[in-house]
Image (tube, rainbow, N blue to C red):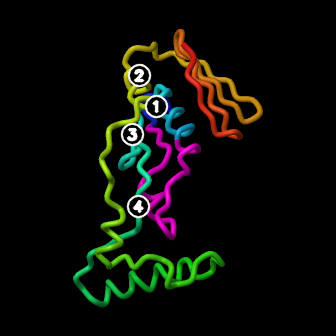
Amino acid sequence: PRPERLIVAAQNHDQVGNRALGDRLTPDAHRVALAVVLFSTCPPLLFMGEEHDERAPFQFFTDHIDPFIADATREGRKREFEAFAAFSGEEVPDPQRVATFDRSRISHPAPDPFYAELIALRRELPRELEVQFASDVLTMRRGTVTLVADFASKTVELRR
């Protein structure tokens, strides 16, 4: 497919919400991943609070009114993770509890200036993109601006 038909994301509700605890990428890994997403020429999908490095989890929550479906969902989540040594059925948040929903609310601080700069550059830079990848380092160039993303060291640099 052509790049303008692809939507790119660093994380989304399925990746995060279907994890046992709804944990997001670590801040350093997220910064690298989202910088690559925003510097690309593809339309970006930003997930709940990514523009300010939201740390609140996005836990799987439901509000089933039918007690049978509510219990089946709750038990299904427990069974889904019981094979993982890191989780016992009691550690997986109960999807029917209001507290599970409340923990998933974003905090709404101001956007991170780095991401705001990358979003602004999307409009200014040419759509032509040069890409090189070697030894865990992705180099992306659009016009006179280069983004260097080091996935091993989890660092990202914008060069003008």
Q: CA separation, marks 3 and 1?
A: 10 Å
Determine contact: label 2, label 1, CB under 8 Å: yes
Whichever of labels 1 and 4 marks the residue nearer the N terminus, that label is 1
- Which marked residue is nearer to the observer: mark 3 or mark 2? 3
Q: What amino acid does circle 1 point to?
A: Leu
Q: Residue furthest left?
A: 65
Taking the spot 53% from the left edge, 39% from the top edge, the residue there is 31
- Residue 38: assigned label: 1
Label 3: few (<14), some or many (≥20) within 10 Å?
Answer: many
Residue 124 image position (x, y, % from top left):
39, 14
The residues colored magenta run 7-30
Q: Is residue 27 magenta?
A: yes
| Foreground disc of the pair 1, 4 | 4
**Dot 4: what SS?**
loop
- Which residue sits furthest front? 109
How many angstroms separate mark 1 from mark 4 (CA)?
22 Å
Give the labeled residue for mark 3. 51
Q: Alpha carbon of mark 4 to alpha carbon of mark 3: how far? A: 15 Å
- Alpha-carbon distance for marks 3 and 2? 15 Å
Q: Reading the chain from its start, which is encountered first: label 2 or label 1?
A: 1
The amino acid type found where label 3 is placed reads Glu
Residue 58 has which mark?
4
